[in-house]
Image: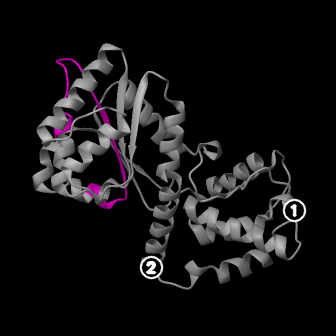
Amino acid sequence: MYHKFFGFKESPFTLTPNSRFFYQSAKHTEALSTLIYAIEERKGFVVITGEIGSGKTTVCRTLLNKLDNRTQTALITNTHISGKDLLSTVLDEFDVPYTSGSKAKLLSQLNHYLIEQLRNDHNVVLIIDEAQNLKPSVLEEVRLLSNLETESEKLIQIIFLGQPELKKKLALPELEQLRQRIAVFFHLTALDEKDAKDYVLHRLRIASDSERQYFTEGALNLIYQFSQGVPRLINQICDSALLNGFIYEKDVIDENLMQEVVRESPLMQIGKGAAQRTLHKMDQYEKEKVGG
């Protein structure tokens, strides 16, 4: 709606993860480098955690765009499933023709595919987003996938992306065998104040292909205070601010307008727990929209 008014080629603050807008903060770059290293070195299991809206999915999308064509990838976002359904979904995501049957039969067919990929010098990567929703019994099924290996290397690399609850779940006594197989844990934190402001400017530059000023320094300060450096919240409040700028025909968002936008934000009207639930619903909606 406001694109033409501000001279944007595309929306700078869409909530849908877009690797074109990937901002290379120290933490996000480290998370991406960790994933690339783990895949190239065939480390097996990697766990990336972070609060809702911290940028895990954007890091994941950026990773997928950086992998070469010798890497076969599958991304699973529906984690409210059984162990057998998970195996079927994995086979579907890798486009493996298979015959339905027992879990053992499905696992055997997956193993055959993985051996064929190794023969072709291909690496195979399974990414499970929202992994904190997996039941312990299903996590144990995922562990069994790591048994698919040769004497020298893993046949499949498995990446868990999840909220901090995932780490707590992995600490359960019954998941000790899985926990021992995890090669890398990485926790993604929110942006500090400087990075948060640079993040806003970075997205504006990409969307406008210019160095034009859209927010005053006072407005940027309020953006950080509102979001506390959480990228999803930054996107949400900046999008609202630009919409209000369009409505009031203000081509630069100043501190006064930003105060009004923050004050009217739905997330300011509810408690922290409800705000987190709201963010989670927004996250799920966007993922379903992209996947569907």
The quarter in which the N terminus is drawn is: bottom right
Side (left or right) of 163 relative to 52? left
Please, what is the three-letter code of the amino acid marked with disc 1? Answer: Phe
- The residue beneath circle 1 is 5
Mark 1 crowd level (few <14, some 14–19, many ≥20, 10 Å Cα): some
**Total numbered badges shown on the rendered structure:** 2
Label 2 residue SS: helix
- Give the image location of residue 194, x and y in percent: 65, 55
Q: In the image shown, does 148 or 238 lie closer to the viewer?
A: 148
The residue to which callout 2 is attached is 274
- Is there a contact, CB below 8 Å, between mark 2 and mark 1? no
Q: Give the magenta-colored segment's residue range.
A: 144-167
Q: Which mark is residue 223?
A: none
Task: Name the residue at 88% across, 66% down.
Answer: 251
For badge 2, the amino acid type reads Ala
Q: Vertically, is 184 above or below 251?
A: above
Q: Residue furthest bottom?
A: 269
